[in-house]
Image (cartoon, rainbow, N blue to C red):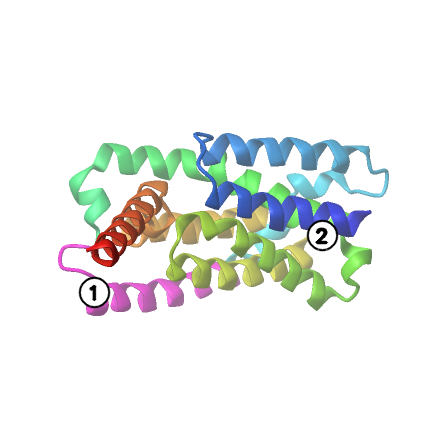
Amino acid sequence: MHAIEFLLMFVVGPTIFAYTRHRIPAIPALWALMAYSLFFLLRDPKFDRGSLWNAAPLGHYALAILGLFALASIIGIVLVRRFGAPGLFLNFPRTNPRLWGLVMLLYPILSVYPQGIVYRAFVFDRYRDLFGPPWAIVLASAFVFTYAHIVFRNWLALILTFLGGVLFGIRFLQTDSLLVTSFEHALYGCFLFTVGVGRSFHHASAREMSSKERLVKQEKSFKQQA
């Protein structure tokens, strides 16, 4: 039964959401998944509710988290400046600082933490027996976290979310703390929005890509008819 639920929730659902025409915003859809996940987590007597807000491991892992983030940030800045489009680097905070500040404030609360509940706390608790060893549940968590981002229609988002999904899954195993993993997730997410890669994680870009695909198809159809 759990296998069917897993496929429906994390494979069929995102596929339908990404490839059908609808007007459902992504954040309310994420909150609905979070509500479903919390409902079953809080009903499970074996689930440690303290893992949802346990801040104690942060002190122990802070140096490792910040050190890895600093290294990844340097690599990210170099890559964006070397291979990014002209003017891409720091474009968001430079052109729209108020909106950027709002995103920095709300993104961890409205997006990161709900994602953590669904793709870390719920997946690890609900499907641990289904996948078995720790490495398997980490990969399963990373896969569904990545697949949820197919809505953005670009490979960069999928690559980065898979790497992040593996990292956050391992960190959740280490700390048993959603607060710690959400803190780490928020660091990387806010960095991507700031440095100039955030557009790959925005629905406007996905809509633009969809529009371009429709134009290409229409052009091909017109040429075939001509």
> Residue 20: image x %, image y %?
47, 40
Identify the amino acid type marked 1.
Arg
Instruction: Spot the residue most to the left.
Output: 86
Element carrying mark 2:
helix
- Name the main secondary structure of what is drawn in magenta: helix
Q: CB under 8 Å between callouts 2 and 1? A: no
Numbered range of the magenta stretch: 63-88
Element carrying mark 1:
helix
Quarter of the C terminus within the rendering: bottom left
Please state if 221 lies on the left or on the right of 118 as rendered: left
Q: Residue at x 82, y 47 (%)?
A: 1
Q: Which of the numbered marks, if any, corresponds to residue 93? A: none
Answer few, some or many: residues within 10 Å of disc 1's Cα (few below 14, many 20 plus, some between 14 and 19): some
Please state if 112 lies on the left or on the right of 203 as rendered: right
* Residue behind mark 1: 81
In this view of the protein, can residue 56 be seen by the observer?
Answer: no
Identify the amino acid type marked 2.
Phe
Answer few, some or many: residues within 10 Å of disc 2's Cα (few below 14, many 20 plus, some between 14 and 19): many
Asked whether residue 66 is drawn in magenta, I would say yes
* Residue behind mark 2: 124
> Residue 130: image x %, image y %?
80, 57
Instruction: Spot the residue most to the right.
Output: 45
Q: Residue at x 47, y 36 (%)?
A: 26
Hey, which quadrant is residue 102 in on the image? top left
> In terms of depth relative to the viewer, which is nearer, 200 or 208?
208
Hey, which quadrant is residue 49 in on the image? top right
Please state if 169 lies on the left or on the right of 70 as rendered: right
Q: Earlier in the sequence, mark 2 or mark 1?
A: 1
Q: Residue at x 25, y 48 (%)?
A: 215
Distance, label 2 to label 1, CA atoms, is: 37 Å
> Residue 200: image x %, image y %?
34, 52
Up-down relation of residue 110 to residue 75 (above or below): above
